[in-house]
Image (spheres, coloured by chain):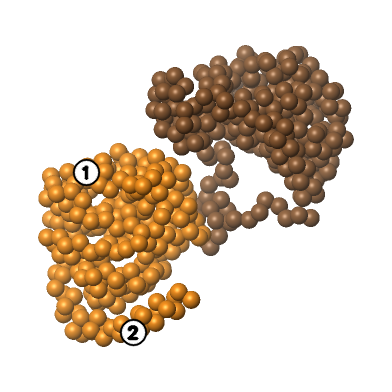
Chain colours: A brown, B orange
Amino acid sequence: MRLRPELLEIDAESVTWFITNFIRDYVSSVGARGLVIGLSGGLDSSAAAFLAVRALGPNRVIGLIMPEEETYDPESIRHAEMVAESLGIKVDHVDITPMLKAFYSSLPAYDPSDDMARANLKPRVRMACLYYYANRYGYLVCGTTDKSEAMLGYYTKWGDGAADIEPIMDLFKTQVRQLARYLGVPEEIIRKPSTPGLLPGQTAEGELGLSYDVLDLVLYGLEHFMDPRQIAEDVGLPLDVVLAVKRRWLENEHKRRVPITIKLAYRSIGHDFRLPYALRR
Amino acid sequence: MALAQMECVVGDKEANLTKMREMVCAAKEEGAELVIFPELSLTGYVCRDLFYELAEPVPGPSTEKMAEVAKEEGVLIVFGLPERSHVSGSVLYNTAVLVGPEGVLGSYRKMHLPTHSVFEEKRYFRPGYGAGVFETRLGRIGMMICYDVFFPEVARLLRLKGAQLIVAISASPGVRRAYFETLLSARALENTVHLAYVNLVGREDGLHFWGGSRLIGPTGSIIARARYNEEDLVVAEVDLSDADRAGIFLPMLRDLRPELFEELGREARR
């Protein structure tokens, strides 16, 4: 196999069929009434919302728009509102700034110069809000992490990584982009640079050091057990860059699994309880 | 011989080769002529999907490196590795190799691959289809691996093929310690044979390996034992001819009833 962009092409119609049926089936099998989803105005959450509405209809999907002061961006909010409006779903605005400030002023260890610790608090507060809505209405939280982010661990553990269902987690970022076009996500959302929106001026490609077009091919190669030397040659990257991506992928396995425990007994969580996610109600 | 009860760095062959070399040197200083490492000691046990990239042919780069060590130190070495078959990189074996100064003297592909509880070996490995006994300057050595210990026919087969020493390498998690401690002495005793068991230590992915490696005599008694739960290197001496004397007092090999094996074969196929 040689890595080439066509490998990432998807049949958007068929993928949509699989994902919407999956959403509908899982939501009903656990007896949930619908999905609540955090809308950032970005590609992933917009695509996930479009899929959720295709699966369940607009009356069973709630969007939350949760800006905060430090990264406040009117355009993102406008995009999120545009998605909600075009889908006809209920949307609530939750300004999380006062909650964050309460954390900052309550935490004895709080240090404003520690950007990462502060940044990760934001998606965790958003997660708490989403779960409040989920509990309040008998909904599930719909995650919006894509496969590129999941493989790299490029998300906040128990923040945006916390959800009940992840409809797009087996699609690389560039594949979500194709799917979003098919679903009718507004083009200006699809075209704008991806950002985690945790810190001002942050862009994913700037932070990861590679464009998603290249990165996704590297990840595709790693998924397919390709030798990093072959990957580097095929995509035209130095070997150490590919090895750094590989290392990042492997080092973040802890984010993708249930927390590790020491095996002590007959059957253990995360080791050898092998049970279905859900029994049909 | 030396029971080299090591802790591995998962997925880091260089680090594990370095440690094996150090332990061989230390064992040699204490007079060992045979140094035994645990199951999959080249890579660690919980490598999961990384096994495909870590696996190597036998003979291959790592057996060559260990043969060099054997040559420098003038010893024999048994260690474990994921073996890549000559057929395809998708076909792997969980293998024990015996190397000496001349290179690979013998290898054994694990026949019983645990795939239950925390074990997923059949997901990665093809089982081996035979047990071999290898003539060395120290005597005839047969090898088996971990879960094979639960099947008395493996040790018996090795013994009937002439093994004077059965080397059992292992990566056994703590929750199974009692079973191994019971069975290992039984395998030695029922075959009146020396048995060297070498287990992994350390924690890999929340699995704790209990160590407790041991050299067992042909009456089932423990001649030497490594510490539980921590890295250790134990060197002990045996006289392989003790087995003959034990066999006069415990003459099970003389009293074997081959027709029962035939019946066993028939019943087990049903």
| Residue topped by disc 2 | B259
Q: Secondary structure at mark 2?
A: helix
Answer few, some or many: residues within 10 Å of disc 2's Cα (few below 14, many 20 plus, some between 14 and 19): few
How many discs appear? 2
Left or right of B24 on screen, residue B121? right
Host chain of mark 2: B
Q: Quadrant of the C terminus of chain A?
A: bottom right
Dot 2 amino acid type: Glu
Question: Can you give x and y, in whole percent of width and height, for residue B203 in the image?
Answer: 42, 50
Question: Can you give x and y, in whole percent of width and height, for residue A80 in the image?
Answer: 77, 21
Measuring 38% from the left and 70% from the top, which residue is drawn there?
B151
Q: Which one is nearer the viewer's eye here, A100 or B2?
A: B2
Q: Nearer the N terminus, badge 1 or badge 2?
A: 1
Q: Which one is nearer the viewer's eye here, A52 or B10?
A: A52
Can you tell which of label 1 and label 2 is closer to the viewer? 2
Q: Where B188 sits versus A55, above or below? A: below
Host chain of mark 1: B
Dot 1 amino acid type: Glu
Question: Can you give x and y, in whole percent of width and height, for residue B110 in the image?
Answer: 36, 59
**Residue B136: quadrant of the picture:** bottom left
Measuring 66% from the left and 24% from the top, which residue is drawn there?
A177
Q: What's the distance in space between the residues labelled 1 and 2, CA to CA?
A: 43 Å
Residue B224 can be seen in this image: no
The reply to the same-chain question for discs 1 and 2 is: yes
| Residue topped by disc 1 | B64
**Residue A114: quadrant of the picture:** top right
Q: Which one is nearer the viewer's eye here, B185 or B117?
A: B117
Question: Can you give x and y, in whole percent of width and height, for residue B248 in the image?
Answer: 18, 84
Measuring 38% from the left and 56% from the top, which residue is drawn there?
B171
Q: Secondary structure at mark 1?
A: helix
